[in-house]
Image (cartoon, rainbow, N blue to C red):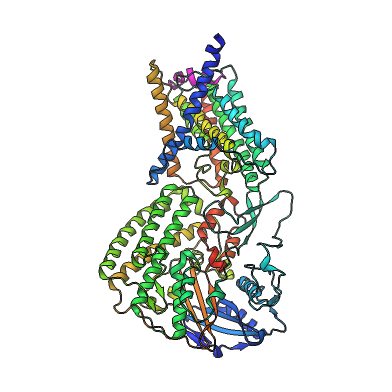
């Protein structure tokens, strides 16, 4: 069964394949041109588990959905990971959430250390009561001159918790293992509780603090689709404006952080200040520097009058000029380029194998951008060119950010003077029963996907969230192979992934 | 009484000057860097406030640390104080000078570093072990360059006493041996940046343990120990800049106040220059640092060849 971004289908229409066919279908499709966008479990009657897969067909802008049923009696299936590495984290997540064993999974370890949703014994004994990483034996490299460096979960900077275990030979990193899960709050089950949608949108704003707009937009689109609500175009345009402001703030901030880690202070301070400019625009429109409180199912809460749009345009023109000057300074310094070029290379093939998304993927010349591939809302009327780079190193990831900043600014300067007229909110009816809706948003880190499912009474029964970091963390491990350990902070910053977006 | 007047008083005077003025120049660097970043920055006296605060605090020791870790800060500070006695600062003659004191000076630096590395290893932290190994490797190279610089200066001055090499005999060399001295100045400037952990070799501002060299080795020090370490580091910078300024500006006007003003002007200018270098270059990749140090060595070596050839 296929649907568009923002579409919804009846649960009954989702084809349920036998396990073997399901497996073959996923692997075959992904070998052709599809990408594994989501793979998750949901509860069925009688304790069975339904595994739903969502494949992205970017050529046709379609999402293909199908499922298989895992009986409660024998909760196991044959793992896809050996044939399809991008499935590894999805399968570990399913194993943890539903206590279903993917047989033959090469690296079956807990993701977030919580009890499963079925209330049966966990695959790992007492996983929820252990301190991360529990009794898990990290990969270790043997040998006289090999040493191990553990960083975190408490870090020197003000960042989120995560544990990084390096196996090094001198300065060279042989292997990096990343352990997350410290930020697990159990957002998914909270989202799926009851009919009250007021809490859901607030929770969605807090999935990842720096992606409030991205996630709340995805949440609203999923709920609106389930309710069959047609959102006014003006509201969609305002969501796009704030989504791009969020992208601008974060990309500019990332460039500044890259400067800081390379020890190049001037641009780091300038970019840091300029990040504040974009956040202040969000503040002006929404009353919150991170855009919380703007997106609500049915539309947006704040409107922008002509004077404000003109003011934004004027300011953005100035910010654009400033950005051009500072990024010219940054990208022409030989000492800066020497730090960026050839560091942390993620080859295109690895990026595709691991299913990497967002600017990281585009820096490895993997062409994917939800705004183009699965355009919905205002994006159907405006075309933002895709920003690609070829080398897949830190430099490429910085360059993609720079291009995206310029293109977002150009897009805003085009959109703001001609905002569609009309209402900013439409009434939201009750959710339709027994349906599944998918919404995709290109957040600044990449593809955000929310999937909402309703039960027979029209209440949310399962809500699946996927932050782009979910795909990309594993790619950081690969980019660090045979690199110098002192280049890790720079490499990490060029990915700049979310811990809480991953840990949910 | 004579002993006190002729020996002890100059020593105390020298120490007083070094201890008092050393932190100021690091404050100047920080201020210059802040200026380039468009910030106001901390007061130039910030390090004094930090030291005053740390001297009032107690030390915390890790369970694995032995007496070496506790002794290291005192040894390092002692080394810097002893070393400072052999270095003339402008008009202030070195209270201790004898033929061959330059060798003692270099080896005193090595003793300080030795204890710094041991103390870092003593903590049992993998970060500090990494920092220690980097410090050991880079100091091998920077010591080589430092020695080569001193050899050239010794040949020029025909003396192996620091006071002669960078004091009395420099003005003579500037008339006739300018190319050699220019090479030495550039080479010594790189050594100064490396020995004092400045960008592009090390980044004193960073909070990222994995990239640090010097900073990571003092992560476990706290309270008075940390104050000792910071003060010793400031003195090291003061001593190195003092030597470099003495080479660059060997002016003796005859007027004591004027001479002091010129010397301090030179020190100030050097601190500003270091700040400018730090603001306009990014830090090198760790595996490129050795190239920079080898360049410093090569420059000094060319200086040596020219010296021998001219002589």
Residue A17 versus residue B39 in the image, above or below: below
Is residue B87 depicted above or below A192 in this figure? above
Is residue B80 shown left or right of residue B42?
right
Quick check: can you spot residue B154? yes
Give left or right: position of A286 versus B105: left
Count of residue discs = 0
Residue A351 forms part of the magenta stretch? no
Q: Which of the pair B278/A9 is nearer the observer?
A: A9
The vertical placement of A28 against A305, above or below, is below
Magenta stretch prevailing secondary structure: helix
Query: At 62% across and 72% down in the image, what residue appears?
Result: A93
Q: Residue furthest left?
A: A307
Q: Residue at x 57, y 59 (%)?
A: A161
Q: Position of residue A173 (x, y in %)?
A: 63, 54
State which quadrant residue B229 falls in. top right
Look at the image and tell me whether residue B157 can be seen.
no
Residue A74, position in %: x, y? 72, 82
Q: Quadrant of the N terminus of chain A?
A: bottom right
Q: Is residue A384 left or right of residue A86?
A: left
Task: Answer left or right for B110 relative to A444.
Answer: right
Quadrant of the image for the C terminus of chain A? Answer: bottom right
Which residues make up the magenta segment? B158-175
Q: Residue furthest bottom?
A: A12
Q: Position of residue B161 (x, y in %)?
A: 56, 19
Relative depth, front residue between A195 and B236: A195
Q: In front here: A461 or A253?
A: A461
């Amino acid at each position: 069964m296929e649907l568009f971004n923002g579409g919804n289908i009846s649960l009954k229409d989702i084809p349920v394949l036998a396990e073997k066919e399901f497996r073959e279908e996923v692997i075959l499709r992904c070998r052709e041109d599809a990408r594994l966008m989501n793979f998750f479990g949901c509860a069925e009657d009688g304790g069975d588990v339904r595994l739903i897969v969502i494949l992205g067909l970017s050529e046709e802008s379609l999402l293909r959905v199908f499922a298989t049923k895992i009986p409660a009696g024998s909760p196991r299936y044959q793992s896809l990971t050996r044939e399809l590495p991008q499935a590894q984290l999805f399968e570990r997540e399913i194993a943890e959430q539903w206590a279903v064993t993917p047989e033959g999974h090469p690296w079956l370890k807990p993701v977030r250390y919580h009890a499963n949703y079925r209330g049966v014994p966990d695959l790992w004994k007492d996983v929820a009561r252990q301190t991360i990483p529990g009794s898990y034996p990290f990969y270790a490299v043997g040998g006289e001159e090999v040493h191990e460096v553990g960083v975190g979960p408490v870090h020197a900077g003000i960042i989120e918790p995560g544990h990084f275990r390096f196996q090094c030979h001198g300065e060279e990193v042989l292997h990096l293992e990343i352990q997350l899960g410290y930020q697990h709050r159990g957002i998914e089950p909270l989202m799926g509780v009851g009919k009250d949608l007021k809490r859901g949108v607030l929770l969605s704003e807090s999935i990842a603090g720096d992606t409030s707009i991205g996630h709340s937009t995805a949440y609203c689109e999923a709920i609106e689709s389930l309710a069959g609500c047609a959102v006014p175009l003006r509201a969609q345009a305002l969501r796009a404006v704030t989504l791009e402001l969020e992208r601008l703030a974060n990309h500019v901030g990332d460039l500044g952080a890259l400067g800081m880690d390379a020890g190049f202070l001037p641009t780091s301070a300038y970019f840091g200040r300029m990040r504040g400019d974009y956040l202040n625009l969000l503040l002006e429109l929404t009353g919150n520097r991170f855009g919380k409180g703007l997106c609500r199912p049915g539309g947006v809460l704040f409107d922008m009058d002509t004077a404000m749009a003109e003011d934004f345009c004027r300011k953005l023109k100035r910010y654009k000029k400033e950005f051009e000057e500072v990024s010219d300074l940054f990208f022409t310094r030989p000492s800066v380029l020497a730090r960026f070029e050839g560091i942390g290379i993620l080859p295109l093939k690895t990026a595709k194998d691991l299913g990497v998304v967002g600017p990281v993927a585009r820096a490895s010349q993997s062409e994917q951008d939800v705004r183009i591939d699965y355009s919905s809302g205002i994006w159907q009327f405006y075309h933002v060119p895709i920003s690609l780079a070829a080398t897949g190193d830190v430099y490429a990831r910085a360059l993609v950010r720079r291009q995206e900043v310029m293109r977002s600014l150009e897009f805003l300067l085009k959109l703001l003077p001609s905002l569609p007229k009309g209402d900013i909110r439409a009434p939201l009816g009750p959710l339709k029963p027994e349906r599944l809706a998918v919404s995709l948003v290109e957040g600044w880190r990449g593809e955000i996907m929310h999937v909402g499912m309703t039960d027979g009474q029209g209440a949310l029964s399962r809500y699946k969230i996927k932050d782009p970091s979910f795909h990309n963390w594993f790619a950081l491990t690969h980019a660090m192979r045979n690199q110098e350990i002192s280049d890790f902070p720079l490499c990490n910053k060029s990915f700049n992934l979310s811990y809480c977006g991953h840990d949910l | 009484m004579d002993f006190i007047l002729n020996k002890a008083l100059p020593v105390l005077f020298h120490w007083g000057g070094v201890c008092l003025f050393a932190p100021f120049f690091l404050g100047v660097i920080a201020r210059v860097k802040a200026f380039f970043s468009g910030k106001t920055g901390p007061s130039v006296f910030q390090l004094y406030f930090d030291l005053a605060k740390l001297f009032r605090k107690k030390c915390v020791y890790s369970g694995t640390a032995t007496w070496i870790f506790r002794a290291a800060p005192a040894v390092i500070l002692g080394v810097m104080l002893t070393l400072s006695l052999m270095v003339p600062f402008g008009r202030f003659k070195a209270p201790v000078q004898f033929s061959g004191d330059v060798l003692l000076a270099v080896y005193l630096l090595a003793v300080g570093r030795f204890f710094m590395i041991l103390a870092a290893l003593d903590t049992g932290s993998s970060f500090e072990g990494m920092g220690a190994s980097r410090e050991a490797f880079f100091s091998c190279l920077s010591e080589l360059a430092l020695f080569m610089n001193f050899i050239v200066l010794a040949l020029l001055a025909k003396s192996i006493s620091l006071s002669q090499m960078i004091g009395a005999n420099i003005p003579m060399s500037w008339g006739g041996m300018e190319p050699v001295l220019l090479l030495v100045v550039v080479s010594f400037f790189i050594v100064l940046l490396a020995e004092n952990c400045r960008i592009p070799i090390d980044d004193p501002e960073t909070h990222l343990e994995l990239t640090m060299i010097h900073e990571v080795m003092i992560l476990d020090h706290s309270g008075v120990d940390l104050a000792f370490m910071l003060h010793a580091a400031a003195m090291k910078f003061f001593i190195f800049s003092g030597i470099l300024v003495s080479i660059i500006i060997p002016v003796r006007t005859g007027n004591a106040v004027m001479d002091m003003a010129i010397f301090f002007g030179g020190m100030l200018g050097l601190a500003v220059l270091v700040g400018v270098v730090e603001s306009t270059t990014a830090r090198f990749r760790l595996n490129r640092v050795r190239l920079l140090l080898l360049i410093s060595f090569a420059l000094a070596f060319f200086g040596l060849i020219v010296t021998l050839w001219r002589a």
